Image (cartoon, rainbow, N blue to C red):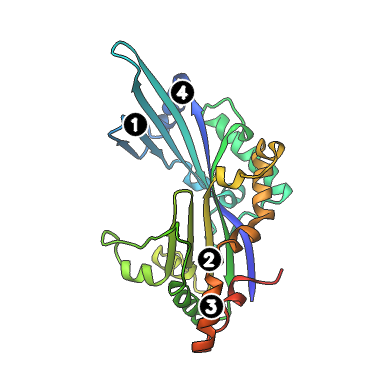
Amino acid sequence: MDFRYGIHTIELFHRLSKKSFNKVFQHLKSLHFGKLYPDATYHSDKGIEKYICTSYCGQGVVLYLYKQKRSKNKTSKNIACSIRFRLNPHTLLHGEYSPKKVFTAKENQLKSLDNRMTGLLREIGLDCEFEQLTLSRIDCCLDYFPESQKWVDEALRVIRRSPYMKQYKLCTFGKGFPNRKEKNAHSWRICCKTTTLTVYDKTFQLMEADLLEQYDAPMLRFEVSRSGAKFKRGLSDEVKGSNKEILKNVMNESEKTIHSYKELQRYSEKIQNSTGTRPMRQLWLPES
């Protein structure tokens, strides 16, 4: 059975001066022909204004702008501003969205990612480079390409019956989601403060999004979403200082990272002995 490691989503963060915030804000506003603002504006009870811009979705990038007013005293105010980029690196590099493709952080890909993001920063009016942004989240994954959908269904069935680490909680789709029973049947997710672990039927996800092609083969994705700080832990200062080096390290360590969540394996032997199910060790530990 074929399998593949990769990175499919990353988030980058950057603090802005009030002047830089206004410059970016006006640029994005101009893309919408002078309308109030891109797509949506949210106001929190902490005084944060959050703006979302999907003008660059075609390039695989969604922008979030934040402005927070904090009163230091009765006579003066300090305004904290920042911008966050959520991007699909593969889409950014290739110019089109391919839902089953991932970024593998090879040297030429990292160089292209640097150039593309730096170009985008210049375009929206920011005088900084890709390496000056802070990696705040990385989603790495292990994709399986089995011969049948039955294998995917059985894997999810066993996973849902498996134990998980005590510091995590089970996360399911609630009543507010349409088709929630089907969603929960085709996925499994646990999360803690810094990490989310998800296993899901990629074929079902594409079908729901009306992106499924007739030739699409079964696919199971095992995804670990962690904060950038979590991924940086234990790295040298030299590696921590470069986004490209961090992403390269994440790819080199992705097998170790994903397998560190394999408390599921201990339960698999019981499943195998009692039901004759294929050992989960064969599912989670592909031979490189």
Q: CA distance from mark 1 to mark 3?
A: 46 Å
Q: Counting residues from the N terminus, which is met first, the one under dot 1 or under dot 4?
A: 4
| Residue 287 in which image quadrant | bottom right
Amino acid type assigned to the residue bearing label 4 in the image? Lys
Amino acid type assigned to the residue bearing label 3 in the image? Ser
* Image location (x, y in percent) of residue 151: 52, 80
Neighbour tally class for label 2: few under 14, some 14-19, many 20 plus, Cα within 10 Å = many
| Residue 284 in which image quadrant | bottom right
Q: Residue at x 37, y 67 (%)?
A: 183
Amino acid type assigned to the residue bearing label 1 in the image? Ile
* Image location (x, y in percent) of residue 83: 47, 33
Neighbour tally class for label 3: few under 14, some 14-19, many 20 plus, Cα within 10 Å = many
- Of marks 1 and 4, the one in the foreground: 1
What is the secondary structure assignment of the residue under circle 2?
Answer: strand
Horizontally, residue 36 falls left or right of residue 16, namely: left
Residues tagged 2 and 4 counted as in contact (Cβ below 8 A) = no
Q: Is residue 70 visible?
A: yes
Label 3 belongs to which residue?
Answer: 268
Label 2 belongs to which residue?
Answer: 221
- Above or below: residue 242 compared with residue 142: above
Amino acid type assigned to the residue bearing label 2 in the image? Arg
Q: Counting residues from the N terminus, which is met first, the one under dot 1 or under dot 2?
A: 1
Q: CA distance from mark 3 to mark 2?
A: 18 Å
Label 4 belongs to which residue?
Answer: 23
Q: Counting residues from the N terminus, which is met first, the one under dot 3 or under dot 2?
A: 2
Q: Residue at x 56, y 32 (%)?
A: 121
What is the secondary structure assignment of the residue under circle 1?
Answer: strand
| Residue 187 in which image quadrant | bottom left
What is the secondary structure assignment of the residue under circle 4?
Answer: helix
- Of marks 3 and 4, the one in the foreground: 3
Label 1 belongs to which residue?
Answer: 48
Q: CA distance from mark 1 to mark 2?
A: 35 Å
